[in-house]
Image (spheres, coloured by chain):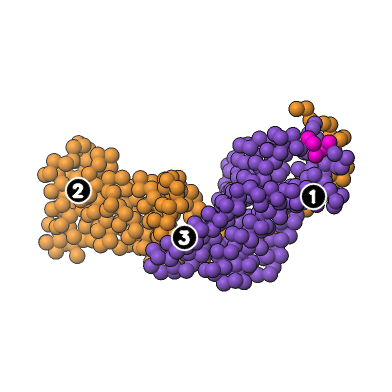
Chain colours: A purple, B orange
Amino acid sequence: MTRIIGPIARATLLEAMRSRMLWLVGVLLVLSLAAAGFLGQVAIIEAAEIRVTVVAALLRAAAAFLTAAFVVMSMVRESNDKVLELMLAQPWPRAAYLFGKLVGFSAAAVLLAALLTLPLALIAPAARVLAWGLSLGCELIILTAMSLFCVITLTHIVPALAAVLGFYVLARSIAALQLIASAAEASTVWTDRAANWIVHAIALVLPRLDEMTQSAWLVGAPPTTGTLASVVAQTGLYTLLLVAAAQFDLHRQNL
Amino acid sequence: MRERPLSSVPVWVTALLAIALALQITLAASRPEPTAKAEDLSAPPGVSALQLAALGEPVALAKLLMLYLQAFDYQAGSRVPYRDLDYGHLEQWLSAILALDPDGQYPLMSASRLYAGVPDPAKQRKMLEFIYREYLTDPNRRWPWLAHATVLAKHELKDLPLARKYAVALQQHTTTPEAPAWVTQMEPFILEDMDELEAARVLIGGLLASGRIKDEREMRLLDRRLKLLEERLREKKAGKRP
């Protein structure tokens, strides 16, 4: 199995390296450094904090979008070029193909996280940047798995990308939604209570992305080892869930 | 593209999915529920930063921020949620939301009906002053909240000079025909409560003489009030009343 997964993963990583994504990352790095310089100039107080938090938030959002877009478009292109059918026609289980793609995309995502963490090392303490970068890598792995699941299920670029970005926004804001919905706990109106129940039910099947890769780690209290361990555990578990769901769907597809 | 039957999915894949889902739900359920503590309400970002974050939708952001602010009030199991808030930060939030959406009534409604209702005179005064300041920037739209603030100052804080200050502002700045007449006629009644009978008499007389009162019943009511005042003044001068 490893002999099959390895080459698929390597080919996927090679695709990421040879595509123009690296150029895009380079432009992003230059822009983020320029933004850091600009913000440092215009801020009257807390210039360092403003610079770090704004740049970190921008890089996080850009990394999420790039990852989702790359995975979705690469998979759709492979499907259109009939590479997917060729792969599935080989004498190996469908799981091998999926794991190979997941490993390749995840490696590309981790590489992307590492590259995008670099400019922050110039403006924030190294230990904190390292923790932030680790968390960003975990977040991007979850997004990779989600993108794979969505593109296998929905098969087209626009619905798959919309679903992934919707998932990302929802997972980032679910805690705030829970807080707002919990206002209905005291309500006697059944629709309020139902809304509260639905929001809490959705929260059960979402990862808490709002607790990951926080800009506040770079300027306020750094994350504890427990927090980072929780981030890694959540990543492992949620990736497993998404891969299982993607496997399930891939096996049901009549290819 | 027809889907293959469920039986074509290997058992280990189905089992893996079920186990991973169960683990995720267990992990999510074991996490403590997110809670907003009153002391956690920090200062809002600057209005410029909020406008930038609004991405051209300041009104939508203002509505969302108001709901966010509300999350600090509606805390399960809390009997006096508003009193625990940092009112300095609360005022900054309300100001920022009003700056994003000046036509929105929600922030001032919350300030007058909710946040000014706490059993803490200092915090009540802070909210009332906030309402007063914001009223002055758009009197014809924001008069209901200053009218309520006037009632609170008079009946809850028992601060008649403060109530009079608000009543004077209402009378001087509210010009919209939508505002009922009593909104602009509160000052004489407050003066009467302050025992400033002469000033109250002059004000009511002035109101009647100005011709601004069109409603027959209101005119009769004010006229009766004027006569009562004059009677009280005569009694006072005669030494019958303290």
| Residue A147 among magenta residues | no
Task: Tell which tag, 1 or 3, sits nearer the viewer.
Answer: 1
**Percent x, y for residue B95?**
38, 56
The alpha-carbon separation of the residues under discs 2 and 3 comes to: 71 Å
Residue contact at pointers 1 and 3, CB within 8 angstroms: no
| Label number found at residue A34 | 3
| The residue stretch that appears in magenta | A85-89
Q: Callout 1: residue from which chain? A: A
Whether marks 2 and 3 lie on the same chain: no
- Secondary element at tag 3: helix
Kind of residue indicated by mark 3 = Ala
Residue underneath mark 2: B225
Front residue (pair B207, A153): A153
Q: Earlier in the sequence, mark 1 or mark 3?
A: 1
Kind of residue indicated by mark 1 = Pro
Whether marks 2 and 1 lie on the same chain: no
**Percent x, y for residue A159?**
63, 36
Residue underneath mark 1: A7
Check the image and report above or below for B239 versus A67.
below
The alpha-carbon separation of the residues under discs 1 and 3 comes to: 39 Å
**Percent x, y for residue A190?**
61, 41
> Which corner quadrant holds the C terminus of chain A?
top right
B146 left or right, relative to A83: left
Give the residue displayed 53% in from the left and 54% down from the top. Answer: A27
- Secondary element at tag 1: helix
Task: Tell which tag, 2 or 1, sits nearer the viewer.
Answer: 1
Q: Is residue A200 visible?
A: no
